[in-house]
């Protein structure tokens, strides 16, 4: 009976909702499910043809790019490969803030205002059209089906975006009930709420979880501490996104819920960039998205080299994202996945530029070098590391039994080995560590690394 209901939702109710919104999500998903099996060369040619048409449309209808192309002498009709993108400047958050109105297409209809959560700085305001929404939802839907689940299967969503949580009106509640989706607020993690979350999950018996890895892992740890089994519910997969997935989080989620974890990469601004399939590959949504890896001198790097992820989203004609600097660091793969899909792969997603730290001598290293020192100490419940500047790093610590006072010196000594003996390491014991306004949690933030990892990140 459950599978019959899921089929009704995925083939009738959800498509009806999308038609009423004037979205062509169903048709896009069906096409994506065909194109994912094309040979890599065919997908590449599809990207080039779409890119050329996209840039021509943008030239004709978007004031900012019409003027930019004229100023630099760029003719989109001459684009014959993806390397043609390198003639265009990067799109940054600063440009979007300064040119918001000029980035709107003159034939755009029904643009919707969006903003990022501002977890790494000032929120970014931008606009999304119906084409972009249809394609992003279709890409997520396709990836969901890779794991043997579908829209209409019972789902728990652990999220913190004010957009989602602010829309819980009567219509949204009815929709979620029909779609069998339950939303748990990721930034309301009190002990009482955690008890309720665990009870809600047990009562719903979801087929899938979706949300921030830190939040889902936190619920998992709470259930384990309470001695409540969660691996008998029939959860098939936990989709995690919007934060770096750490190995200990993945292990905790898999152990507690008895399911696999599927990592996803993207953002409200850059779009649905990549998602992991059951064979392990992080497949880029290449039908819509072109990914470049950029080095410290703004050069395009070859697969296998680490740099800033820059995205061009081909379904954003009404408010274009062309060579958009994400501020994330990653590596492209030059191999295809064992699953047989022709979609290109992200080999690594190493985190945001601010997830890196800079030693006093200028050496750049991933923040995990510091995270591991704190995370594995007995009695550490929560922590957050903030590199204020080259001479000062602060550690906020929530600790209990069996945390020992000498562990403070272990942290200080370990950090000094990584950052330099002259660096001041300040340990601050706190009762709790608040999440970002978006509900996300970040173990480490560097106010130094953003200017040292990649140019303009």
Image (tube, helix red, strand yellow):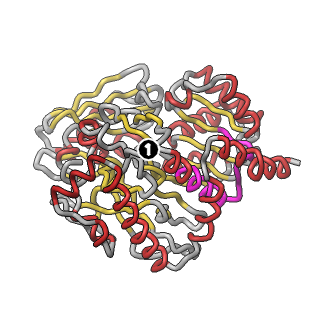
Give the residue drawn at x 85%, y 51%. Answer: 4
Q: Which range is magenta?
A: 136-156
The answer to which of 11 and 401 lies nearer the viewer is: 11
The answer to which of 26 and 6 lies nearer the viewer is: 26
Query: Where in the figure is residue 434, as x and y percent of width and height?
Result: 42, 25
Q: Does 94 sit above or below residue 295?
A: above
The answer to which of 130 and 91 lies nearer the viewer is: 130
Give the residue drawn at x 61%, y 45%. Answer: 22
Q: Is residue 23 left or right of residue 403?
A: right
Task: Mark yes or no: residue 189 visible.
Answer: yes
Q: Exactly how many numbered labels are in the figure?
A: 1
Query: Where in the figure is residue 448, as x and y percent of width and height?
Result: 19, 40
Query: Where in the figure is residue 53, as x and y percent of width and height?
Result: 40, 65
Quadrant of the image occupied by residue 13: top right
Query: Where in the figure is residue 217, as x and y percent of width and height?
Result: 55, 40
Q: Does 432 sit above or below residue 51?
A: above
Location of mark 1 (residue):
108
Q: Does 42 sit above or below residue 198?
A: below
The answer to which of 198 and 209 lies nearer the viewer is: 209
Callout 1: SS: loop
| Residue 69 is a magenta residue | no
| Residue 155 is a magenta residue | yes
Task: Mark yes or no: residue 251 visible.
Answer: no
Q: Does 88 sit above or below residue 169?
A: below
Quadrant of the image occupied by residue 306: bottom left
The residue most toward the right is: 1
Q: Is residue 161 left or right of residue 312?
A: right
């Amino acid at each position: 009976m459950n599978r019959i209901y899921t089929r009704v939702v995925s083939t009738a109710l959800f498509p009806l909702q999308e038609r009423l919104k004037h979205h062509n999500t169903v048709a896009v998903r069906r096409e994506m499910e065909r194109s994912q099996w094309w040979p890599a060369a065919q997908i590449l040619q599809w990207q080039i043809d779409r890119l050329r048409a996209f840039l021509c449309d943008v030239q004709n209808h978007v004031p900012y790019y019409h003027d930019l192309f004229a100023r630099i002498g760029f003719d989109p009709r001459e684009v014959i490969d993806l390397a043609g993108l390198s003639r265009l400047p990067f799109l940054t958050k600063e440009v979007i803030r300064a040119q918001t109105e000029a980035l709107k297409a003159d034939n755009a209809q029904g643009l919707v205002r969006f903003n990022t959560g501002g977890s790494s700085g000032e929120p970014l305001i931008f606009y999304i059209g119906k084409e972009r929404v249809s394609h992003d939802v279709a890409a997520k839907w396709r990836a969901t089906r890779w794991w043997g689940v579908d829209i209409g299967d019972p789902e728990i969503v652990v999220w913190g975006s004010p957009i989602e949580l602010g829309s819980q009106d009567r219509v949204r509640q009815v929709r979620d009930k029909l779609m069998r989706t339950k939303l748990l607020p990721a930034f309301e993690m009190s002990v009482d709420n955690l008890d309720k979350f665990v009870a809600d999950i047990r009562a719903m018996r979801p087929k899938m979880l979706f949300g921030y890895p830190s939040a889902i892992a936190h619920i998992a740890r709470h259930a384990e501490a309470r001695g409540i089994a969660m691996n008998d519910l029939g959860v098939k997969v936990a989709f995690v996104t919007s934060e770096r997935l750490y190995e200990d989080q993945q292990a905790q989620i898999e152990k507690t819920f008895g399911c696999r974890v599927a990592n996803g990469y993207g953002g409200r601004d850059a779009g649905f960039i990549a998602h992991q399939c059951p064979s392990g590959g992080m497949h880029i949504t290449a039908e819509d998205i072109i990914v470049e890896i950029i080095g410290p001198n703004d050069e395009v790097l070859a697969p296998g080299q680490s740099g800033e992820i820059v995205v061009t989203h081909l379904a954003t004609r009404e408010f274009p994202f062309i060579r958009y600097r994400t501020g994330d660091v990653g590596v492209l793969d030059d191999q295809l996945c064992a699953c047989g899909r022709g979609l290109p792969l992200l080999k690594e997603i190493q985190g945001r530029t601010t997830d890196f730290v800079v030693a006093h001598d200028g050496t750049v290293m991933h923040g995990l070098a510091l995270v591991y020192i704190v995370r594995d100490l007995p009695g550490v419940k929560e922590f957050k590391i903030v590199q204020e500047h080259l001479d000062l790093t602060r550690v906020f610590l929530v600790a209990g039994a069996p945390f020992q006072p000498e562990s403070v010196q272990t942290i200080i000594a370990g950090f000094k080995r990584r950052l330099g003996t002259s660096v001041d390491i300040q340990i601050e014991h706190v009762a709790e560590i608040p999440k970002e306004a978006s509900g996300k949690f970040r173990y480490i933030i560097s106010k130094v690394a953003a200017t040292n990892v990649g140019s303009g990140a």
